[in-house]
Amino acid sequence: MTTFIKETEFFQLHTLSDRVYAAISISGRGAWSNAGIVDLGDELLIFDSFTTPSAGHELRKQAESLTGKKVKYLINSHYHGDHVFGNQAFSDAAIISTSLTKEWCKEKNKLEDVEKEIKETNDYLTNLKTRIHSTQDPIIKASLTNQHNEMSKVLDDLPHLQIVLPSVLFEDRLIIEGSERKVELHCLGGGHTPSDTFMYLPQENIAFMGDLVNEELHVPIFNPDDFINILKHVKEMEIDILVPGHGNVGNKDLAETVSDYVSFLMKKSKEALENRVPLESFLSDFEPPSEYLNWRGVNGIRDNLSRMYRFYAE
Ligand SMILES: [Zn+2]
């Protein structure tokens, strides 16, 4: 049973179990993804830090005032900015990720020239506006509008954004035992990015999935084979409450739905390649099944189809 506690500028707080909370982002406010708060007994652990320092600071403030304890650990599930650009609010905590996620953070999340970043973000926002006005598809229009609103919040924070990298690294598994509760970090490879970590609370059967599981979202797929294998493992775990990287708190059905989605795209792409259908006609002739028609994503289902087609063409 999850219970709604309160709404802040960036997110809603829900209790998942005694002193375990999900911070579910409110669309377009600068949090963009979901985060978790776990009271380990004497200190707090935070899972993912949102997309702006402002949202990260609010997360820390709410976590510490809810529990009266201090944050000791921050987990970065993967390198994407919408999950790690709030890291600077936790710069005195032990920031934990896989070694590979840290490498990708270092490589992809560079901030060398702020003026240049501001200009590029402004150009990107202008481009999004053009696409919002020209697209006829209401779901893509809504997804682009959300992207525009979130990126505007990133732009507001860019002048004082600092890239804070993880400092405590692990490879495939790490257990953190607090005085009253333990959490397990699992990395079974990379499905959405080259390295994806999820967090499991074995006493409470709660999982925080990062972007390995999302609700009705065409989340980018990095490696479909690994994605399916990771989700197969997740489906075999005892999970009663599952917090997706984006969307509402659910249960293991969310993992099942994502797994079916990846399998479906994989099957279609492989069929097209076997029949030597060129990518362009594969994409233009493709009819999305009704169950995916309402899924969000700025490029819709075809972006993942094309990604997967190329993946198996190699
Ligand atoms: Zn992501």
Image: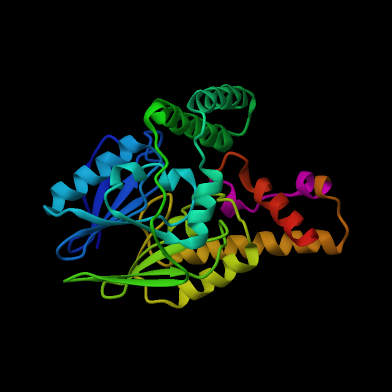
The residue positioned 53% from the left and 73% from the top of the image is 232
Where's residue 63, x and y in %? 20, 49
Where's residue 256, x and y in %? 50, 67
The residue positioned 48% from the left and 27% from the top of the image is 114
Image label count: 0
- As displayed, is residue 66 above or below residue 256? above
Q: Quadrant of residue 2?
A: bottom left
The residue positioned 43% from the left and 57% from the top of the image is 77
Specify the segment rendered in magenta: 281-295
Where's residue 221, x and y in %? 61, 55
Outermost residue, right side: 276
In this image, 201 relative to 105: left or right? left
Question: How was the colour assigned to the protein in this rendering?
Answer: rainbow
* Residue nearest the observer in this picture, 197 or 301: 197
Where's residue 122, x and y in %? 53, 22
- As displayed, is residue 130 above or below residue 310? above
Q: Quadrant of residue 40?
A: bottom left
Outermost residue, left side: 68
> Looking at the image, can residue 254 be seen?
no
In this image, 202 relative to 81: left or right? left
Task: Let me know if residue 15 is in the magenta part.
Answer: no
Quadrant that contains the N terminus: bottom left
Task: Let me know if residue 291 is in the magenta part.
Answer: yes
> Looking at the image, can residue 282 be seen?
yes
- As displayed, is residue 297 above or below residue 15? above
Quadrant that contains the C terminus: bottom right
* Residue nearest the observer in this picture, 200 or 15: 200
* Residue nearest the observer in this picture, 46 or 225: 46
